[in-house]
Each structure stands twice: as structure tokens, then as C-alpha cells.
Image (cartoon, grey):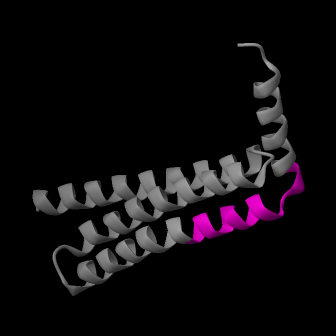
Amino acid sequence: MIAGWIRLSAAAALLVLGLFFEILAVFGVNRFRRALNRMHAAAMGDTLGILFVLLGLMVIRGFSMDSLKLFLVVAFFWIASPVSGHMISRLEAMTDEELGEIVVIRKEIAKEEPE
């Protein structure tokens, strides 16, 4: 009986923690102006939020085939999310003209400073 309550409490804590990271990611996406900063906030919050929510669901189900499937979903998200984020950031870096100008200006400023 007590073990069930402990498991339920741990699962609820993990679910709330995952929800907290998801909400934090929403605020991060709305706070930043640049697309790359927004994407970073979304990717980090999404990755941690999904991890903790699915861990909470695994704790609720216990050791079963359902937990194995949830673990495979976590593994897929942890593999696919960085790859898709990297591809989107490369597209943004190649197509955003302002981003290129900022990098060039910083290089020119560094060259003009006396040593």
C-alpha cells in the first residue's frame, strides 16, 4: 500500500517537473528575439519536458512492455530532436542576412583593434 503511494508520488513529481520545463520553454521562446535563441530554448525545454513526462509515465506503469515502448519514444526524441534542431539552425544561418552581417562586423572590429 505504501509502495503504491510512493510510486504515485514519484510519478506525479516527474510529471509536474516535465510540465514545468515545457512551460519554461514557452516563456523562453516568447522572450527571445532571434530565431536561433528561440530554437535553443524550445529544444532544451522540449527535450527535458518530454523526458520527465515520459519518465513519470514509466514510473506509473512499472516494469512492463509499455515502459519499454515509452523508453524507445524517449530514445527516438533524444536522437531526432538535436538532428532536426541542427538542420534548422544551419538553414537559419545560411538564409538570414542580418546574422551574416553581425559575424562580419565582429570579425572586422577584432581586426581593427591594436594589439
Q: Foreground: 33 or 45?
A: 33
Q: Foreground: 37 or 29?
A: 37
Quarter of the image with the N terminus is bottom left
State the image coordinates of residue 112 (x, y, percent, origin top left): 82, 22
Q: Does residue 62 belong to the magenta stretch?
A: no
Q: Foreground: 46 or 55?
A: 46
State the image coordinates of residue 63 (x, y, percent, origin top left): 16, 76
The outermost residue toward the bottom is 65
State the image coordinates of residue 74 (x, y, percent, origin top left): 37, 72
- Horizontally, residue 18 falls left or right of residue 32, namely left
* Most common secondary structure along the magenta stretch: helix
- Image position of 87 with respect to 69: above or below: above
Give the residue at x 50% y 56%: 19
Q: Foreground: 1 or 48?
A: 48
The outermost residue toward the front is 115
**Range drawn in magenta:** 84-98
Give the residue at x 26% y 61%: 8
